[in-house]
Amino acid sequence: MPVPAIELENVTKAYDPAKPPAVREVSLAVAQGEVLALVGGSGSGKTTTLKMINRLIEPTSGTIRVLGEEVTAIDPVLLRRSIGYAFQGVGLFPHLSVGDNVAITPRLLGWNADRIRRRIDELLALVDLPPETYRDRLPAELSGGQRQRVGFARALAAEPGAILMDEPFGALDPITRDILQTEFRELQRKLSLSVVIVTHDMTEAVLLADRIAVMHEGELRQLGSPRELLTSPADDYVAQLIETPRRHSDFIESLMHPGVGGEGGAA
Amino acid sequence: MSPRLQLLVEQLPNLLGGHLSLAVPAIFVGVLISVPLGILCVKSAAVRGPVMTLISLVQTVPSIALLAIMVAILGGTIGYRPAFIALLVYSILPIVRNTIVGLDGVDPAMKEAARAVGMRPVQQLLKVELPLAFPVILAGIRTATVWVVGIATLSTPVGAPSLGNYIFSGLQLRDWQRVLFGCVATMTLSLVLDQLIALIETSLQRRRMAMVWGATGALAGLLAVGLAPQLFRTTAVGFAGMAAGTNSSAATVAPADSQPALVGQTITIGAKGFTEQLILTELLAHRIRAAGGTPKTLGNMGSTIVFDALAKNTVDVYVDYTGTLWSTVLKEPEPIQRAAMRVAVAGRLYDEYGIVTLGSLGFENTYALVVKTEEANGRSLRTIADLTPLASRLRIGGDPEFFGRPEWERVRSLYGLTGIEQVGMDSTFMYQAVADGQVDLAAGFSTDGRIDAFHLSVLDDPEEAFPPYDAVLLVSPKAAENRPLIAALQPLMNRISVAAMRNANRSVDEDGLTPMAAADVLQQKLMLRSGGPSRLKAADGQSIRE
């Protein structure tokens, strides 16, 4: 069995020793080619957990491994260059063109100009932004959805071993979000990307993730496939969270088939 | 173009060059210092507090005082260096402040993004934080530019030529066209520099690199234009200094009379900021030119600044007055008899500073309390003592410098004028102020042509409270060894009467002659020829040291 893309072992983060830790004793693993969603409300510790993987935040205790290598043994800067990152609110640099934004990490890695140019064009084509049209535009000249595509391209640019995504679809309108989610899933499958995605939206997690890790008050409450969460939630909190997409789905189902009604008896 | 305007335009390259050579390098060096300092402040709270306190404090020092302080800090050095340093200091605050504000204002998400894509701290700063803070930093540079170009006009009184020369001399000569010309030139320069920087900003935003380089090139060109004369001047002074040195040693070897020429030498003439000094400067310049030398004038300097410059050989020659030297330089509280003072001043200036007093020019320019003639007649005011009973109801106008002088203290106590209200004003305005009744009397100068022009009368000083103010020609320790220079200046000794001087002053102040034209008239009146007969006359025991 190949090594997991990302592995957390008893990871704890305490900002203030006097307060309960932001993340407590979290252990989980993301297999290569797998999408894991970290789901929870604000203050659940999901974003802190994500940022500890590329050492934007240093853990207080515990071990984190990326492709089998302990992250504390790697220069944090080199570590970050080896992991793609898609930001909440996209995080494109407004003073750099689309092409330059995508090229940041390859340039930091010292790729030659020719390879970088080919990579930019390849990636922009991959995210459905024709390079000759978009390469030299500034982020301000793009729509929200287009910016998010550039954000993906940038995260993929340096052929990373894993990709971290922090609420990447949060700022988009529902239609654009739906399109991008679908495209992201296709892209992920095609490239067999290992992804950790943070979201507060359980519906999104169910749609995108192979497995879901539910966090609450710094603790990992349950880790399982969407089906496992739906069928056997570990506690009331998980049950409550997973209830939302189920209820939406049932409601829409009842609208589609008004005659059937009832508690999902159509199945 | 009117001849007066033409005269102003002729001076423009020199004064604009002087202004550019101060302002543009000051801003440039200011940016080089301030941006890193601002970055340091943002990165270290321990640096930020003290640095911001210090630069904010310095900024509250009035600019003209800061320039004067720089002269003092540099041990009396005048000219480019104190002015440059003062301007540099002024440029720092807005740039540091805006660098801090700009960097503080960078979205934390952008900083985190820079870390997350794998930038090292220096890369984060250079590739993300500084570019994002750039518009704010540039706004600070523009503020600094406008400040520095404006304040550079105040370099004139510390002996650095600038567009301020128009303003200061215009004020002295009551030539408003000249003042306005200086203002408009300064404002234009300010706007041009500001707009060039703005152009860089907008073209960068629109990513028009050709425009960016064009504007940057124009600024660099101005920097070069500003620096070139400065570098050239530095070497020129160096050469002149060397030339003077070799020349004087040659002169001591060779017989004095066979070396009359000042060819190839630049002689620096200092002047304080009033009409008489401007005319005498031109007169001295005329003599130096006649001997083949190149005169360089540093006008509108403060009293003690020009003296210190002479002691340091920065200025070669200037005219001062015995009473001024007696009280402000030699710090003597009580005046003594006129001839005795001349001898004592000459002796002590040589002993204490190595400055040589070539001799008296022949007239005295003493302080004089002046009142309206009709007022003097109506109230039978003849002497200062007649003011005593009225003192508490009187207002006296005068130069702020005058009210700080020991002789004013003496006059007040000797005549019981303690209750009098003092109104400080530029000496240009005070005669008019008396004539208009804005003040009751003024502390004028006995040679001033405006005393007659405004129908004013001088009150007698029976107690001899005002010390004697013989105009004397002083030369610096180094220039004193320059025999051709001494020979060129000696014909001026004891040749200028009070009447001639007052006339010359009046022709400038009232008739609108330029100081140069007035000096020409004076020169013709004296009918001076090179190496005239007056060399013996000057050696009447008071001045020449052999």
Image: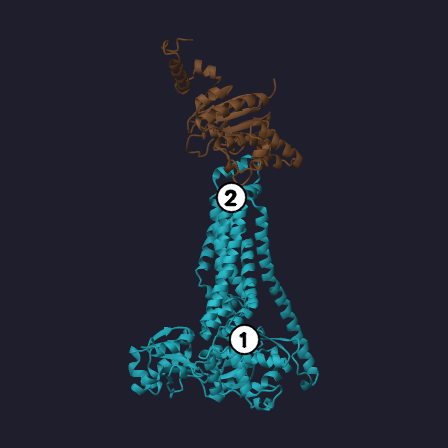
Chain colours: A brown, B cyan
Compared with B51, A83 (above or below) is above
- At 45% from the left and 16% from the top, the residue drawn is A229
Give the side of residue B475 with respect to residue A256, left or right.
right
Q: Residue at x 46, y 84 (%)?
A: B502
Amino acid at the residue labelled 1: Gly
Q: Toward the viewer: B15 or B383?
A: B15
Considering only order in the chain, which callout, 1 or 2, is on the residue closer to the N terminus?
2
Which residue corresponds to the image point at 52% horizontal and 25% vertical from the top-left? A196
The crowding category of the residue bearing disc 1, from other C-alpha atoms within 10 Å (few below 14, some 14 to 19, many at least 20), is many
Callouts 2 and 1 in the same chain: yes
Residue A113 lies in quadrant: top right
Q: Which residue is mark 1?
A: B270
Disc 1 secondary structure class: strand
Residue B74 coordinates in the image, percent (x, y): 54, 67
Q: Chain of mark 1?
A: B
Q: Residue furthest right?
A: B254
Percent across and percent down for residue B496 are: 51, 87
Question: Would residue B361 be seen by someone viewing this image from the given angle?
Answer: yes
Percent x, y of residue B309: 55, 73
Residue B247 position, x and y percent, is 67, 78
User: On the picture, is B15 further left or further right than A14?
Assistant: right
Image quadrant of residue B528? bottom right
- Residue type at tag 2: Leu
Chain of the residue where label 2 is placed in the rendered structure = B
**Residue hosting label 2:** B132
Is any atom of residue A31 visible in this view? Answer: no
Give me the C-alpha separation between circle 2 and circle 1. Answer: 50 Å
| Residue B499 vertical position relative to residue B175 in the rendered view, above or below | below
In the drawing, does residue B107 fall left or right of residue B372?
right
* Relative height, residue B147 to residue B273 (above, below): above
Front residue of B502/A26: it is B502
